[in-house]
Every structure is written in C-alpha cells, then in structure tokens.
Amino acid sequence: MMRTLKARMVLFCLIVLVTSLMLLVPTMQLPSGNEVTTRIGPRFWPFWILALLAAGAAVQLVLSLFSNAYEERPSKKEQTSSDKLTWLQANTHIVVFVATMIYLYAMTHFGYLITTPIFACVVSFALGERNIKRLALTTLVAALIVAVVFDFLLEIPLP
C-alpha cells in the first residue's frame, strides 16, 4: 500500500511538473503588459499560475520522494470514536458547492462587497478554520485581493 501510494504521488507530481513546463512555452508567446493598453498583459496570469504550479509540483515531488508519511491507515474496525468525522467534515465538498451556488445567486442581488466576505467566511469555516481572528483576516484579504485584481489591475468593474 505504501509503495503504491508513494509511486502514484510521484507520478502525479511528474505529470503536473512536465505539463506546466510545456505550457509555459506557448504562454511566453502571449503579449506582455508593454504590448497592450491594460496594466498587465494577457501573459501575466497564465505565466504566474503555471510557474507556481510547476514550483509546487517540484516541491511536492521532492517531499514525496524523501518522506516517510505514506503509512497504512487503520481499518474501520480499529478506528476509535474520536476518529469519526463530524457531519461538516464528511460533507465539506457539498457545503462548499452549495455556498458557491448561493454566493453566485446572491452576488447579483446584493453585490460583491456584501456577499464575498460572507462567502469567504463560510467556506473558510467549512474547510476547518475555527479561529475568529483568522476567519476575519481571510475574509478581509479575499475581498481585497479580488477588488484589487479585478477593479484596479484588470479594470473590470465589480458587480
């Protein structure tokens, strides 16, 4: 089990790394910010996303190769009651999906500045954050990042 999981992780990291590096070549042919009228060109986001994806895959590949973290999990009979998941932990994917659908609907009625902080807070809570200060900080940072990226850099007005 351990070797299979480790081999799969290494293979996945290699595929992501090679694919992202291959996609960087055509990305470099897109116009930069100096060649267009907007502050950042069409090359900016694809380049940085692919570069960070390649870097993350490389780091994960190294960690996977030198890690002993791939251990067998205990069977269901061996699990204690403290190992059981809560409803929220077991259904996080559903909560995030429903929150996203509600967010998309509510944004058209209440606007970005009201719905985005609420959405960021709900999703952060669903993903396991319980510290109030970190929830508030995540909410604020999410709203600011999207406002700066869309309104200022891309010059797209917020809804």
Image (cartoon, rainbow, N blue to C red):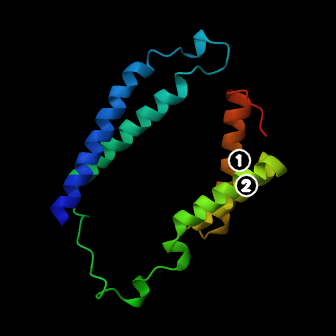
| Residue 98 image point, x, y percent | 63, 61
Q: Is residue 137 something that shows in the picture?
A: no
Q: Quadrant of residue 122?
A: bottom right
Q: Residue at x 72, y 39 (%)?
A: 147
Q: Quadrant of residue 152?
A: top right
Q: Which of the two labelled residues, at mark 2 and mark 1, occupies the earlier sequence position?
A: 2
Q: Is residue 11 above or below residue 2?
A: above
| Residue 153 image point, x, y percent | 68, 28
Q: Say if mark 2 contacts mark 1, CB within 8 Å.
A: yes
Q: Is residue 70 above or below residue 58?
A: below
Secondary-structure class at tag 2:
helix
Gap between marks 2 and 1, in whole Å?
Answer: 6 Å
| Residue 112 image point, x, y percent | 77, 46
Which residue bears the numbered disc 1?
Answer: 143
The foreground one among 94 and 74 is 94
| Residue 35 image point, x, y percent | 58, 10
Which residue bears the numbered disc 2?
Answer: 117
Q: Is residue 107 something that shows in the picture?
A: yes
Q: Which amino acid, mark 1?
A: Ala
Q: Residue at x 40, y 19 (%)?
A: 26
